[in-house]
Image (cartoon, rainbow, N blue to C red):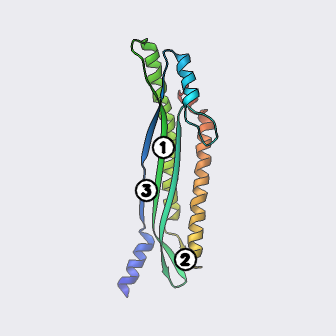
Amino acid sequence: MKHVAICLFALFFWNELRASEPLNVEFYEVRGNNARDLRKELGDHGPVGDDGSRHHGYTKWHVDWTFQLIPSGKLCAIGSVETKLEVTMTLPKWNKPEGLLEDLTREWERYSTALRLHEDGHYNIAVSAAQEIERRLSGLTGTAGCKTLAEDINSKARAVIEEFRAKDLGYDVATEHGATQGARF
């Protein structure tokens, strides 16, 4: 019996935390022989965000969570937490014609690097959201039974998602969708 109590104690306090962080990068093609044409292509073919607007790049993310509960009479504790993060980053790829001026090529490379840096910021927010769910859920216990604890866990996880969606939007506002980071072509 003593060993069972020790095992339950260990399960309560040493939760199994796993976060997957897959990043799927997709590209859309743009064509052009000059900056004006490339800007038009970016505006016409960029991904459509959740806001309904086209953007030069876009990072869409989703976090799922699962958990195991350990009942013990009227008490209940979370035994393990796992998050699954899915991220799709969409970026432009220039189908560059032969014989263009080096200035345009350098400007595209500068812009592409800055856009990727900006989108990586969105990815980092998504990773932080998954990690924060695990952190906040780790070690939760309840005295009203497992059903009530499960409801509390899901409510807390949804609150984290809302919090980090707001951070994601704030990041775009603060960076002017990457313009302050150089992601303007």
Callout in the foreground (2, 1): 1
Q: Residue at x 53, y 30 (%)?
A: 181
**On screen, 110 above or below 60?**
above
Q: Residue at x 55, y 32 (%)?
A: 46
The numbered mark, 1 or 3, whose residue comes first in the sequence reads 3
Picture coordinates of residue 159, whole percent (x, y): 61, 58
Which numbered dot is residue 88? Answer: 1
Q: For the image shown, how many numbered marks are present on the structure?
A: 3
The image quadrant where one finds the C terminus is top right
Q: Amino acid at mark 2?
A: Cys
Q: Residue at x 53, y 34 (%)?
A: 57
Q: Do callouts 1 and 3 mark residues in contact (Cβ within 8 Å)?
A: no
Picture coordinates of residue 3, whole percent (x, y): 35, 83
**Dot 2 lies on which element?**
helix
Q: Amino acid at mark 3?
A: Ala
The numbered mark, 2 or 3, whose residue comes first in the sequence reads 3
**Dot 3 lies on which element?**
strand
Q: List the residue tagged with mark 3.
A: 19
**On screen, 34 above or below 166?**
above
